[in-house]
Amino acid sequence: MTEKLKKDVFMACVVRVSREILPHGSFKAVGETHKIHPRTVANLWYSTLKQIPGYQPNTPLDPVSLLANVPETAFTTKFENSGRNPKHDRDMLLQEIKNIDPTARRTIRSLAGAVGIPVMTIWRMKQSKKLKVHTMALKPKLNDDHRLNRLFHCIAKIDKNTINSVAEMTFKSMYNEIHIDEKWFFLVRDGLRCIVTQDEPPPKAISVSTRVTSLKSCFFPLLQDQDSIIQRDRSLMD
C-alpha cells in the first residue's frame, strides 16, 4: 500500500467514528470503498492507533484528537530497511569498478567477471541507478580550417552556368577529373558500450591509427562511341 492510500483509509475510519467508538462493519465498508480486504483495514487502523502518543486500548475515541496527534511517520513505508544486508559493500564495488579498464566492462557479464561478483549484483546496482550504460560514438575530429576547406571545395564544384539560373544550381559533371581517396578500414569499433558509475566521467572514444589502407582512384569512363570504352576504373592497392 502506498502512503497516500494508507492515509486515506485511516481518514475514512476516523470519519466513521460515532459516539467515541468505531461502529461495527466499518472495516468492511472502508475496504469495499478502497478495494482492499477488511482485515488489511483493521491492521492499519490498530497499528496506527498504537503509534499515537498517549493512546490506551479500549478508551473513547475522539476524531479531532486522533487527527491532531497521529505522527507523520505512521504511514511511511521504509523499503530500504527491509530484507537482508547486502553481501558486498556497494561503495567499495563502485570504487573498484572505476579502476577497471572501460573495454573490460562493456556488458554486465564482462563487468561481473572483472570484479569477481555475481551478475545479479551488477544488475541490481544498475536497477538502483548506481550504474548506467554509456555509449561511446567515434566522431571525426575536424577543426575550423578543415570544415572551411571542405566548404570551399564543394563551392568550387558548382557549375557557374547554373548559378543565376531559375532552376536549382547543379554541380559539374567532373568527367575530366580523377578522384583519389585513401580508404581506412577497422580503425576502431564505433558505438562501444561501457558501464560507468553515476559520478564517473564517461570515457572518450580514441581512434588508433592502423596501416590497413587502400588507395583508390575513381573516374568516369570516356566513351569514344557506344561500343568502346577507352578509360576504365582502376584501383591501386597499397
Image (cartoon, rainbow, N blue to C red):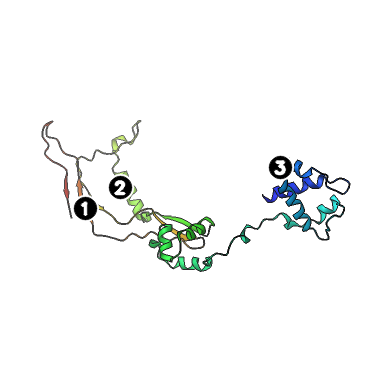
- Which of pointers 2 and 1 lies earlier in the amino acid sequence? 2
Residue 153 falls left or right of residue 227: right
Do the numbered discs 3 and 2 sit on residues whose CB atoms are within 8 Å?
A: no
To which quarter of the image does residue 162 belong?
top left
Q: CA distance from mark 2 to mark 1?
A: 23 Å
Give x and y (percent) for residue 30: 75, 43
To which quarter of the image does residue 32 belong?
top right
Mark 1: amino acid? Ser
Q: CA distance from mark 3 to mark 2?
A: 72 Å
Q: Is residue 219 above or below residue 45?
A: above
Label 1 SS:
strand
- Which of pointers 3 and 2 lies earlier in the amino acid sequence? 3
Q: Quadrant of the C terminus?
A: bottom left
Task: Quickly name the residue at label 3.
Answer: 34
Q: Residue at x 72, y 47 (%)?
A: 39
Do the numbered discs 3 and 1 sit on residues whose CB atoms are within 8 Å?
A: no
Give x and y (percent) for residue 207: 33, 59
Give x and y (percent) for residue 107: 41, 57
Task: Quickly name the residue at label 1.
Answer: 214
Which of these two is toward me, 27 or 147? 27
Label 2 SS:
helix
Mark 2: amino acid? His
Residue 43 falls left or right of residue 229: right
- Which of pointers 3 and 1 lies earlier in the amino acid sequence? 3
Task: Quickly name the residue at label 2.
Answer: 153
Which of these two is toward me, 106 or 232? 106
Label 3 SS:
helix
Give x and y (percent) for residue 135: 42, 54
Mark 3: amino acid? His
Disc 3 crowd rating (10 Å Cα; few below 14, some 14-19, many 20+) is some
